Image (cartoon, rainbow, N blue to C red):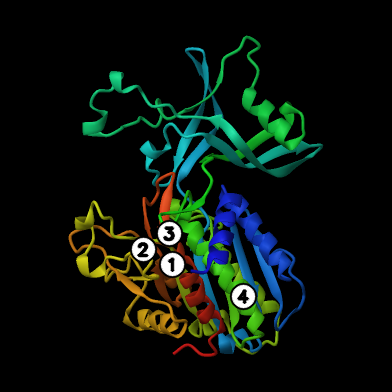
Amino acid sequence: MNDAIVDRFVSFLDASPTPHHAVATVASHLGARGFEAVRVADPPRQLPAGFRGYVRDEGSIFAFVVGNKPVVDAGFRVIAAHTDSPNLRVKPQPLQRSHGYVRLGVEVYGGVQVATWVDRDLGMAGVVHVKAGDSITSHLVDVRRPVARVPTLAIHLNRTVNSEGLKLNNQTQLPAVFALCDDDDGDPLRALLAAEVGCAPDDVTTWDLSLFDLATPTVGGANGEFVFSARLDNLGSCHAALEALTTAIDDGPVDHTTVVAMFDHEEIGSRTQRGAAGRALEHVMRTIMTNAVPQGPGTLSRALAHSFVISADMAHAVHPGFSDKSDAEHAPRMGAGPAIKLNVNQRYTSEGSTSAMFAMLCEEAEVPVQWFTTRADMACGSTVGPLLAAGLGVRAVDVGNPMLSMHSVREQCGSQDHGWMAAAMRRFLVRPKLG
Ligand SMILES: [Zn+2]
């Protein structure tokens, strides 16, 4: 097992409690490898072959390496993933005082497994926007101590909890206990955030804050075969793509232009300014095309006709206690390699031709590959792949590493699969020709 990459993965997970932090973590790794920050609003006039850049947009980031050949001839090779995970977001006016407690009102972001969030030591992270003279400054904050908790009701008062499961009302029972009420009636959240940022409490104007489980990501299992962490969906794919990109550049320049796109907002449908159904990636592609040297005559549509997307998002591993939820012939196991995800109704964009391409990349990288389809009598999930394929008109394949407990506050995946995914992605980025 390649332990070094798993250690880097665990550190990456720990450093990235929110999409904004994931983007900051990715940007710092890219910066260390010579990638320069580029603004779509004001790009460098020339992007020479081999130029390494990234465009950062809040919780989304787009890294690229300009190819040796005009992108209209050699196309883009894109790996796409998402930075966001379902979690609890702090409301704009969150303080609720009752029965001697101050609670934080939360909104549920994406498809949270709500019951997994109870009785956890919760930190708080995100961005705080602060008034500074006549402008607003934004500050990343990462409050890494147990400031909040959603307590369960004692079993003596909830006798059916084991037979009927824990059910919470998101409005009345999910707000997190944050403090005890005191007499001065101050604002304990603003005070805490002001201390984090180093400003006056009154200057804290707004925030984009998430609660997160303080349990540290870790390698687990009898032989270290698992990773236990929050946010594996989909920081697992983001980190594999980052590893692929930062090692592929060691092989030297290639003809095609490489793009690694990490999108925010997948868990809420992607139809946002910087989501995969928006135009952020297209704007980055147009910026590269307009400013890349060498250029050839032609349009973005010609470049996209030469392009290919690997959309990577975690896959459902077969669950030993619920194996009837899987199709027996398409039930990925942990520790057996990445899965190619197929659905004839195109909830995943993979088809025979694009799946064959990924299987070939795996074979060349000596990576085992598995196949996933949902049971024919169950509904299928989806991800950024079909949105990019449809929005850009580009060939694509959906893949992902197997995991359990998807959308729980604490998830589980296989440690060896992570290096395998990175190796298959790396092969995609360095292979001279695709098919
Ligand atoms: Zn996902």
Q: Which residue position is annotated with label 4?
A: 247
Quick one: which residue is furthest to the top in this view?
Answer: 183
Q: Is residue 361 left or right of residue 33?
A: left
Query: Relative to the observer, which residue lies in front, 133 or 80?
Result: 80
User: Looking at the image, is mark 2 or mark 3 earlier in the sequence?
Assistant: 3
Q: Which residue position is annotated with label 1?
A: 417
Q: Which residue position is annotated with label 2?
A: 334
In the image, which disc is placed on residue 136?
none
Q: Is residue 29 left or right of residue 112?
A: right
Which residue: 46% across, 62% down?
A: 415
Judge whether 301 appears above or below 128 on screen.
Answer: below
Which quarter of the picture shows residue 342?
bottom left
Kindly report the distance in space between the C-alpha atoms of the residues bearing marks 4 and 1. Answer: 17 Å
Q: Secondary structure at mark 3?
A: loop
Instruction: Report whether residue 255 is seen.
Output: yes
Q: Secondary structure at mark 1?
A: helix
Quick one: which residue is furthest to the front in this view?
Answer: 222
Kindly report the distance in space between the C-alpha atoms of the residues bearing marks 2 and 4. Answer: 25 Å
User: Looking at the image, is mark 4 or mark 1 earlier in the sequence?
Assistant: 4
Q: Is residue 288 left or right of residue 327?
A: right
Which residue: 73% across, 71% down?
A: 34
Which quarter of the picture shows residue 38?
bottom right
User: Looking at the image, is mark 3 or mark 4 earlier in the sequence?
Assistant: 3
In the image, which disc is placed on residue 223?
3
